[in-house]
Amino acid sequence: MRILLIVVGLISGYVASAQWKDFMISVRGDTLNRVDMSGKRQGPWVVHVDALRGEQGYDEQGYYEDDLKVGKWVRFSLMGDKIAEESYRWGYLDGRSKYYNHTGSLIREESWRAFEPGKAFDTVDVVDPTDPSRIKNRVVVKVDGKTMRHGEWKYYDADWGTVYKTEQWFMDSLKTGKDPDALAAEVEDDLKPIDVGGNKKDKNESKKPQAILDYEKKNSGKKKVNVRDGRTGGN
């Protein structure tokens, strides 16, 4: 039986080495920190960072897809205490992130919105600031493939566990401290649809001189008259 287990282990190791350019085996026999033949990180990963020059070290675990962080990532101090929970999409922060102090008390919650890299436009929900569960509108906005602070941020008193500060973010713009009705109008204006049809007027389009505009306004509704424009000849 023992010989059979050794053979199975050797076969599994051979299959893994043939599939991955680099990897490590955990104490439980899981294949971690896998790098595919094109050099991209794939699957479950664990990361260890030593303390250096006053910066505290940490251990981190999560998941990679095509060299980009995705899903939930958890960070621990070198003493084993959880200090962060982050959510990723396309390698960027997306959704809720939570941060803790060295005793495990929650100190901050953040909200992020990630945008698909290489995508010029995306659709964003405009929620009612007085009722986050109510979507007021849905608009098309121009993006540049990164992450933005978007949603409610909370700051906690670590000793009492109570919220002492709240911020409202909309597409990286801080909207805290404004009247709810004015805030709703401002948010909707900030996220107004982008003209993606190419129907905008040419910025270099020539404009009539103010004198001509004044003349046309004064004589609107009257019999059409010829206006001399300085040209000569029969044209």
Image: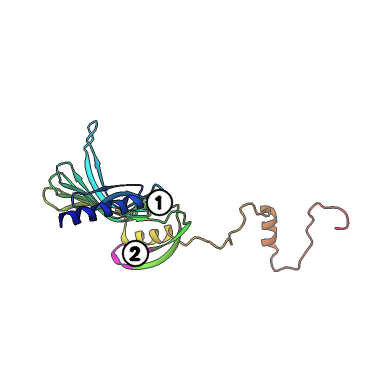
At 41% from the left and 49% from the top, the residue drawn is 38
Q: Which residues are magenta?
A: 125-134
- Location of residue 117 in the rendering, given as x and y in whole percent from the top left corner: 43, 54
- Location of residue 150 in the rendering, given as x and y in whole percent from the top left corner: 34, 55
Residue 127 tag number: 2
Who is closer to the viewer here, 3 or 50? 3
| Foreground disc of the pair 1, 2 | 1
Who is closer to the viewer here, 121 or 209? 121
Q: Is residue 93 above or below residue 198?
A: above
**Among the 4 quarters of the image, the one containing residue 53:** top left
In the figure, is residue 219 to the left or right of 44? right
Residue 79 shows in this picture: yes
Graded by Cα atoms within 10 Å as few (under 14), some (14 to 19) or many (20 or more), the crowding at tag 1 reads some
At 40% from the left and 51% from the top, the residue drawn is 146
Q: Is residue 109 magenta?
A: no
Which image quarter is the C terminus in?
bottom right
At 15% from the left and 46% from the top, the residue drawn is 81
Q: Earlier in the sequence, mark 1 or mark 2?
A: 2
Graded by Cα atoms within 10 Å as few (under 14), some (14 to 19) or many (20 or more), the crowding at tag 2 reads some
- Location of residue 40 in the rendering, given as x and y in whole percent from the top left corner: 38, 49
Q: Main secondary structure of the magenta part?
A: strand
Distance between mark 1 and mark 2 Cα atoms: 21 Å
Residue 146 tag number: 1
- Location of residue 210 in the rendering, given as x and y in whole percent from the top left corner: 66, 53
Looking at the rendered structure, the kind of residue marked 2 is: Val
Who is closer to the viewer here, 59 or 94? 59
Helix, strand, or loop for circle 2?
strand
Residue 167 shows in this picture: no
Looking at the rendered structure, the kind of residue marked 1 is: Lys
In the figure, is residue 206 to the left or right of 19? right
